[in-house]
Image (cartoon, grey):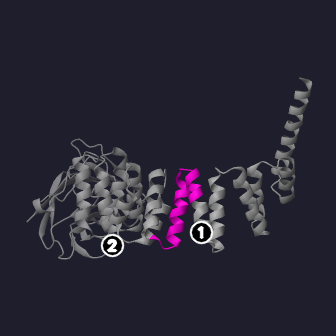
Amino acid sequence: MVAAFTVASFWSVRMALADYWFRQLTVPGTQEALRLEPGNAAYYVRLAALTQDSDPARSTLALQRAVALNPWDSVAWVELGLRAEADADLAGAEHSLLRAASVDRQYFPKWSLANYYFRRGNPDKFWLWAREAAQMAYGDLTPLFVLCWKVTNDGALIARELDIRKADQEANYLAYLTGQNRTEAMTQAATRLLAWNREADAPVLLAACDRLIADDSAQPAIRIWNQLAELRRIPYTALAPGAGRSLTDGDFTVLPTAQGFAWRLPDAAGVTTLLDEQPAGLRISFSGRQPENCDVLTQILPVMKNSSYQLRFWYRTSGIEPETGLGWRITDLHGASGIAQGKSLASESEKEDGLAFTTPAGSGLVRLTLTYRRALGTTRIEGFLVLRKLRLMPV
């Protein structure tokens, strides 16, 4: 009993000393740790990392020793494969990388093989391992998507080859496509993601809708918006410009969300908005310290091209004098070209008014904006405007 205790104590002290030297993160310290515990594969991996630049041959021998002691170390196998590839030993590189994948079924070895076959120009094996990697991946798949788009510009082919089966991965793919502004593939991915009908996907789908709107891609943007509305993932109704439905929430029942075809509130200091009117309406207050020129409220309207429209609206103001610069404006999508300018808004009692305009021939989207442009000879307005109802009608 005493002898056994003594032996156990000896090895405990020896292992503690080895761990101490290992933690020094130096070549001499790691060598001392290996002297004390020569069968520890992790120590050889550390030695390989420490000597990679100063003594590459020694570093590679240390890695080889590490996988001999621990054949299940996939990271070490991958590193050996990369070094063999750098030395033009392609057979050795492929062997080590395949060995890594055989001992570790997780993402990293599969991702490493996809990269290897990409560099070797082997599309069949690239897609095999890219698909394997996608099936095992969790979290952000952007690096894999980037690699796939270097192989092909066919977004539908990528989706098929990766065989994405999880809603989270489909959402990740759509977010990537949106960031890269790949319009056609984005539309296809959005259609697939909508089929999952998940509440959590509404933000990424609305981001795709915004991207399509910014690109003047009216029909794909409307399709995403309408499907979200039909699935009740957004609190709005579907749009149909051909049937005269181009305006969203003309009764101001929902606080502007700044996405898609909903009302947007540009960031203007000194301007606040509230939905606290009875009957329903949007109150927009001006502190008198707002910029002399600012956009207050805006909405992107999907319309029929080269068509006449009449905008009708009901409003009242308090503390705002006539001809002081608050009014509606219709422009092209990006606000660069004016289409129509409404009269200055000022009425202490509720009033109905209108604005007629004709849409351009080249685009199915226009911008409706409530703007404030301080009129010459006036001070900045201080008071509020209540918008109760808007209607947009084809003429």
The residue that appears at 62% across and 70% down in the rendered structure is 85
Using the rendered image of the protein, determine whether residue 102 is visible from the camera's viewpoint: yes
- Can residue 288 be seen in this snapshot? no
Residue at 11% x, 69% y is: 308
Specify the quadrant of the image occupied by residue 199.
top left
Residue, x 87% and y 58% (percent of image)? 28
The image shows residue 100 at horizontal and vertical percentages of 59, 56
For marks 1 and 2, give the CA distance.
Answer: 79 Å
> Which residue position is annotated with label 1?
91
x and y percentages locating residue 206 in the rendered image: 33, 56
**Residue 208 on the magenta segment:** no
* Magenta stretch bounds: 98-122
Left or right, 189 with respect to 22, comes to left
> Which residue sits furthest top?
1
Left or right, 90 with respect to 9, comes to left
Rendered position, 202 above or below 149: above
Amino acid found under the numbered disc labelled 2: Leu
Identify the mark at residue 376; answer none if there is no mark: 2
Mark 1 neighbour density, 10 Å: few (under 14) some (14–19) many (20 or more): few
Q: Are marks 1 and 2 in contact (CB under 8 Å)?
A: no
Name the amino acid, label 1: Ala
